Amino acid sequence: MAVQIALANHKGGCGKTTLASHLLWWAAKHKLRAHGVAIDPQGNLIQRIINDPRLQRERVYRANDWLELTYSPNAAPGGTFNADVVVFDFPPGFDICNIIQPHLWLVPVDGREAVDGLMTALRTMKVAAGGLGVYAVPNMLDGAGRIPTNAVRDALGKVSGVKVWPASIPDSGTIQRSAEFRAPTWRIPNGAGSAGDEAMQAFCTEVFRLTGLTRRGR
Ligand SMILES: Nc1ncnc2c1ncn2[C@@H]1O[C@H](COP(=O)(O)OP(=O)(O)OP(=O)(O)O)[C@@H](O)[C@H]1O
Ligand SMILES: [Mg+2]
């Protein structure tokens, strides 16, 4: 059975689609069969990886030999996937996060306001048996005008039932540009080896190590 990872937060623009797309690109690069599911009706996950597809419910889009995508607006996709990992990209809001029960929830947090609501959300966020729980992932907290990373990490640490991801992802021009290039940080011009790329690859590496998928020796 595929490992299921879901990205959610009640706040828009905190990095759900960015983290989801990088996890998929990273998995495919390491020859894991990866499947992305755009639960967000805007279909940003698909748009971020494949140039301008016509979004069609339940249609499977093939990005490359290892990466496929399904558009499943506001609903759990029917059937099962022939994949090692399935990554679900939710719209802002926690109201429909009970439609699936993944092994791991990742909640990107880009500021204090993204911390609010997490306690309520925990009542609806279900984790599959033997799963890894709910992790808050501090993202972009070091940019101008942002609340410093440590202050948000401290606030997150007080939310019971949520683990705080050990590393924080920086506000990075490389990560920003990856969205424009529809490519992972390591594939965009001058991206490979930058601080944003290293942080993103370290994040992906650790997620897949945690799931046990990279212990299969691929
Ligand atoms: N670590 C980062 N550094 C710089 N830019 C980032 C970072 N993470 C995300 N972004 C940028 O922030 C914007 C919002 O990110 P993204 O689309 O992933 O958020 P989202 O949570 O999926 O938003 P929505 O709720 O609208 O679906 C994008 O332009 C993305 O490139
Ligand atoms: Mg999104």
Image (cartoon, rainbow, N blue to C red):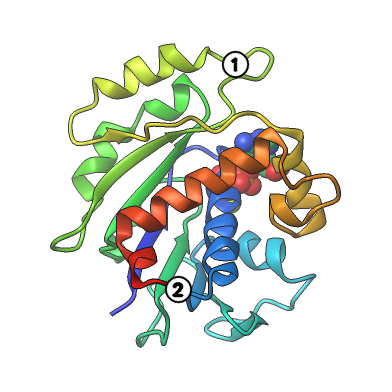
Where in the image, quadrant-wise, is ligand 1 located? top right
9 vs 99: above or below: above
Q: Where is residue 33 in the image (x, y as percent from the top left)?
A: 48, 79
Secondary structure of the residue carrying numbered label 2: loop
| Amino acid at the residue labelled 2 | Arg
Location of the N terminus by quadrant is bottom left
Q: How far apart are marks 1 and 2 (CA)?
A: 39 Å
- Horizontal side of 193 relative to 150 (left or right) equals right
The structure residue drawn at horizontal position 70% and vertical position 49%, both measured from the top left corner, is 185
Residue at 33% from the left image edge and 65% from the top image edge: 215
User: Of helix, strand and loop, which one carries label 1?
Assistant: loop
- Residue found at x 33% / y 15%: 154
Q: Nearer the viewer, residue 151 or 57?
A: 151
Q: Is residue 29 visible?
A: yes
Residue under label 1, please give it: 146
**Residue lying at 35% horizontally and 67% vertically, measured from the top left:** 213
Q: Cβ of disc 2 within 8 Å of ligand 1? A: no
- Few, some or many residues within 10 Å of mark 1 (<14, 14–19, 20+): some
The front one of 47 and 91 is: 47
